[in-house]
Amino acid sequence: MNERPPRAGVLFDLDGTLLDSAPELAAALRQLCAEQDRAMPAYALVRAVASHGAAAVIRSAWPDADAETIAALLPRFLAIYGKDLATRTRPFAGIEPLLAALDRAGTPWGIVTNKSGALTLPLLDRLGLATRAAAIVAGDTLALKKPDPAPVLHACALAGMAPRDSVFIGDDRRDVEAGRAAGLLTVVATWGYLGGEDPAAWAADALVATPHELAVLLRRHAFCA
């Protein structure tokens, strides 16, 4: 029996693209700051770095700390965050209709994130997305993470996607670099966290301001009906 030939598909970054996880990360940081008698930074500072990982979130409250101090705080932060996983995290408005449109069209979609699998998989399961995604590649699935293209190519292989016909959507420079190096079209979700950078400087193939605008773009290229 012949295997189905690779198809066009859609890959998403997780935090800041599919999911608005900043409120949950900020809540965990608030508890950590309270335990450490540390002032909580402004939410805007936390949100801006939410795509950069837990260490970056901690550093928003300890901006002058050395790497050893951040590393020492990391296990407690992750324990706090993991305990209430999916309590405050939700898909961005418009994401669910977009995923439903991809499902109706039979277009495979997947997730490539630098978040650990121990956090990614339970989070997606609790939000009802784990069984719908054709591929989930977490930050520790492979030895390499974004901006290396290996996780993107691995997701394409798992989902049966042809990289040259597929698209990767993210809200960080690393997403664009990884997607481009893997041969996919790249789109920046400017509703995401962006890390305080100007996404126009990342040389993506397109920038979209809302999930609806992304749906229009994908429909134009026949990814969804």
Image (cartoon, rainbow, N blue to C red):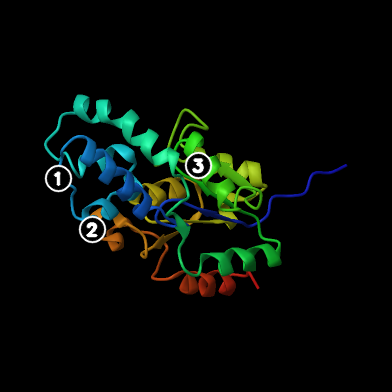
Identify the disc placed on residue 62: none
Q: Residues within 10 Å of mark 1 (few under 14, many from 20)?
A: few
Q: Which three-letter amino acid code belongs to the residue tagged 3?
A: Thr
Question: Quadrant of the image for the C terminus?
Answer: bottom right
Expressed as whole percent of the image width and height from the top left, the position of residue 218 reads 55, 69
Residue at 64% x, 42% y is: 158
Q: Earlier in the sequence, mark 3 or mark 2?
A: 2
Q: Which three-letter amino acid code belongs to the residue tagged 2?
A: Ala
Q: Earlier in the sequence, mark 1 or mark 2?
A: 1
Looking at the image, which is closer to me, 213 or 62?
A: 62
Which secondary structure, mark 2? helix
Is 156 situated above or below 7?
above
Residue at 67% x, 47% y is: 160
Expressed as whole percent of the image width and height from the top left, the position of residue 166 reads 57, 56
Is 51 situated above or below 150?
below
Which secondary structure, mark 1? loop
Q: Is 224 displayed left or right of 118 in the figure?
A: right
Residue at 26% x, 30% y is: 73
Looking at the image, which is closer to me, 213 or 154?
A: 213
What residue sits right under mark 1 in the picture?
39
What residue sits right under mark 3 in the picture?
120
Which secondary structure, mark 3? helix
- Rounded to the nearest angstrom, the CA distance separating label 1 from label 2 is 14 Å
Q: Is 99 displayed left or right of 60 in the figure?
A: right
- Rounded to the nearest angstrom, the CA distance separating label 3 from label 2 is 23 Å
Q: Earlier in the sequence, mark 3 or mark 1?
A: 1
Q: Is residue 54 visible?
A: yes
- Rounded to the nearest angstrom, the CA distance separating label 3 from label 1 is 28 Å
Of tags 3 and 1, the one toward the viewer is 1
What residue sits right under mark 2 in the picture?
44
In the rendered image, the residue lying farthest to the left is 64
